Amino acid sequence: MILSFAGNRLTWSCIPTVSSKTMEENDRETYHRFIAALKGPEKLTIPSETLYGAINHYLTTLSNDNLLEFVDTLVQSDKLWNANDPSGIREAFRLASAAKLLALKQSFSSAWLKQARINRQLRQWGDTLAHCLLEASSTERRTQCMIGLLRGFDGDEVCEVFSESSCRTQIEEEIVLLLAKMGADPSEDANLFVSDLGEVVDILRSERLKALNPRGILTEQRQSWLRDIGSQAPSGADTIARGKIISRCFTILDHGGPSSREYAWGEIRTLLSDLISISSDSERKTPFNSETLEAFVHISQSVLDSVQRSKPLLDDQTSPDPTVQTMADILVILSDISSTGRKESRYSLDTTILQILDVVSAKANTSEVHNLFSRILHGDENPDRGAFVLVVAQQLIHQISERTFRKILLPLCNLYIQKPEYPQSFEAAHAYMVAVFEALQKEGAEEFDGRMNMVSHLAPDHAELLLEQSKRGHLTDSELVRSFSTVCVAAARYDPAILDHCVALLDLAAIDAASPFDHTLRLLRIAVSIGMPVDSLDAHLDAIRDVILALPPADHERSELVRALFNTIMRDLSDHTKRRGIEWWLRYQHELRGGDPGDALRAKL
């Protein structure tokens, strides 16, 4: 596979049988024609994908002498930069390091001490390419190429080779110097500074970024970011870049001395306060977009890392807990952004929320959690925000008071558990109720204050609702079995009569059930066995046995029911009832599996 020209179009060609010399001559001729096309007056008609592939190819294959000429030609070619997106050229430079590594691995596939030789050759290539870029003339174009090369040096496969190399050091220092000049020159395009810094801010070493005055950058970018969001017309790329810059500058200052940490946290408190004001503006017509969400997740993750790494520099004598207050502010903002922004670019939102909830769960009291839910539900209610609240509630299950459950969460569940047309909030409502009933099954459920009595009263209605929604196709069989059995078993812990009521619901449902749902009801009978008292277990299992034996021995559904019954007895019954269940199984297993009822007696003999 080689590059070749067809007219004024550069293409990849497959030449099956040519000598190595012929390929080298062909490639050299193609290279000179490519250089001529970049320098010539004619319009460049090479497709972008082929053009970037050619740049990547020659960056990794040219000799040192030709590489300097090639890089200088790239940087000075007006028609290349005017007709193509700089990000594409930057990407070609980024991929060059990995491509060079692959080529070296092929060259040294059978060499002695090949890894050491590959690493040495790769560093030498990096030194040469870095030198070529440093010698090039055009400042901004050179900067774009160096940004791409630096990101390539940071790639997973080559980062160890270049981590302490002189070429990386030179490129980093030159980029920082260029950024410092851009930031200090009022005539420079501020958006270009943000764009370039946003590309490298996460990979530049902290000691180099400190030369850019992170305090000033943090304040300036915070103000610009909030101003763009408040204007209701934030630009996507700049919004994300500013979020990354704010995040990184905060981290650098937070690793500094007391005054730097105090400054960083002061900026974050101001940012959170202003962003909450913007999000609560009732006259705001344009919702937060996905770029704002991605940018804020970057910022939130930096604050979270600081909280998890060490005690944040906040006045710990204030009330409520300042750490909880900061995490609550972030959650309130995330609820607004995630419920109004587009969902296709959520970045690491779910992971960030779970980590924040871990902090809140460890530090918050029930009053602070109640205030958190009240703040999140401010303004216009919508299904996305409802889903957000219920997901948060599921994670903070043990920090929720009876007051919070009655006044906030239960009404929210009752609203969205009846609305399958909103899948996220519908699923979140069901998942939260399952979490509540599961928590009530465990030891120490008395910590739920008075909720146990209230939930026990809710269980019968909830069980009936589950059956009805499953019959309508809103719940899958596995969802119904898990939810129904969890509700019944948890409620039976406080009032066994509720379990009898739930079994009676199954009897009533079976009368009107169609064939497929009838099988689901049989599975439910088996699932609720785990909540049966010892004295009632045999009778319940006998009823299940009668249902199974009514099916033909070769019926697939019968085999599935027997398997489910076996797993329930052996795996799910409590220690208190397991022995009784095993004894019952040993008596009837042969009959259930389709054998002669006397087989069990003969097996014992």
Image (cartoon, grey):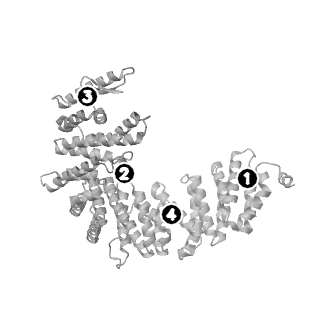
Circle 4 residue: 432
Dot in front, 1 or 3: 3
- Give the amino acid at mark 3: Tyr
Tag 3 or tag 4, which sits nearer the N-term?
3
- Residue nearer the viewer, 234 or 218: 218
Circle 3 residue: 31
Horizontal arrangement in the rendering, residue 415 relative to residue 203 (left or right): right
- Residue nearer the viewer, 552 or 262: 262
Tag 3 or tag 1, which sits nearer the N-term?
3
Element type at mark 4: helix
Tag 4 or tag 1, which sits nearer the N-term?
4
Q: Position of residue 210 (x, y in %)?
A: 24, 60
- Give the amino acid at mark 1: Ile
Quadrant holding the N terminus: top left
Circle 1 residue: 548
- Give the amino acid at mark 2: Ser
